[in-house]
Amino acid sequence: MKYSMNLLLWGTEIDDRLFPTLELIKEIGFDGVEVPIFNTNPEHWFNFRKKLDSLGLACETDTICGPDQNLISPDPAMRRHTIDHLKSALDCSLVLGATRLMGPYHSALGVFTGQPATEEEWQWGLEGIREVADYAESLDITLGLEYLNRFELYLTSCTDELMRFVKEVNHPSCKIMFDTFHANIEEKNIGDAIRKAANDITFIQLSENDRSTPGKGNVDWDGIFQAIKDINYDGWLSIEAFSPKLPVANIWRKMFDSEEQLMRDGLGFIKRRIEQL
């Protein structure tokens, strides 16, 4: 198993100022980091890659699409713009040495029509992701699509919907990234959802119900770790926790003592549970 820390805990401005944090992440015992790609200029990431390499930290990447980047928009120009945006995020991922670009970018975060997704929107999403997956394959990168809960997304908001979407994309470079936060809201049984999606899961984010320290809330960790064992998963387990530094996550109060304490406690909890399997 490999253990990762998502840098969104420190917000969206990822640059040289986080170098001491990367050193701490390495010292605590993580194998890698998840780097959010909001700056899609590849040149921005060269120094960051050098620092990661010097520390021996691996890297996978995440991105999102906002209101002006939407693969299921009725505007063809916006759909084309979004595909170009995602290809730029893949270029940045290549600079960072990532083998996965993950996130809910099959549609726009926080954009709703007041209705379920239409068949036309579904097809626009499939067409866009197929083109992005083709480009990802040329870079030897896998897409890890994510569903979000009903309050953040409407194209896919549960495991069944995302599995159907990935199946219809039908591309070897398009897989699923499983996030326990959204599953805790939307699934009847998180463990069953993991087992159901086993063949498509390329990455797992472990997130507590309140986005704070894993193991300190009410997520069904027994069921999750049992499912991880049942599917013989031996890939990345990543802590995704947020703070008020990430306004888009609607975190209005700090629910942990410090980022360092969250990482130490969270990683210790995960490793103990894995050792018990």
Image: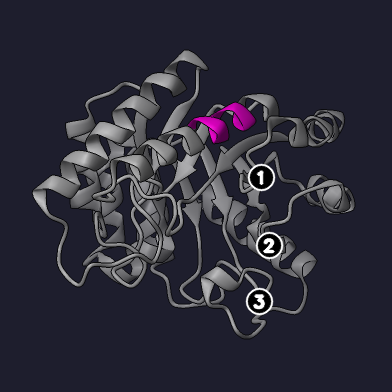
Residue bounds of the magenta highlight = 87-93
Q: Is 78 displayed left or right of 95 in the figure?
A: left
Tell me the mark number nearer the camera, choosing from 3 and 1.
1
Please give the name of the residue rendered at 85% of the width and 35% of the height, measured from the top-left corner.
51
**Residue position marked by numbered label 2 in the rendering:** 11
| Residue 82 colored in magenta in the image | no
Q: Position of residue 205 (x, y in %)?
A: 49, 52
Q: Is residue 216 above or below residue 160?
A: below
Q: Position of residue 253 (x, y in %)?
A: 63, 85
**Residue position marked by numbered label 1 in the rendering:** 39
Q: Position of residue 99 (x, y in %)?
A: 55, 26
Q: Quadrant of residue 109?
A: bottom left
Q: Nearer the viewer, residue 274 or 56?
A: 56
Crowd tier of the residue under label 1, counting other residues whose Cα lies within 10 Å: few below 14, some 14–19, many 20 or above: some
Q: Quadrant of the N terminus?
A: top right
Q: Nearer the viewer, residue 81 or 95?
A: 81
Q: Which mark is on residue 25? A: none
* Dot 3 and dot 1 residues touching (CB under 8 Å): no
Farthest left residue? 119
Q: Earlier in the sequence, mark 2 or mark 1?
A: 2
Crowd tier of the residue under label 3, counting other residues whose Cα lies within 10 Å: few below 14, some 14–19, many 20 or above: some
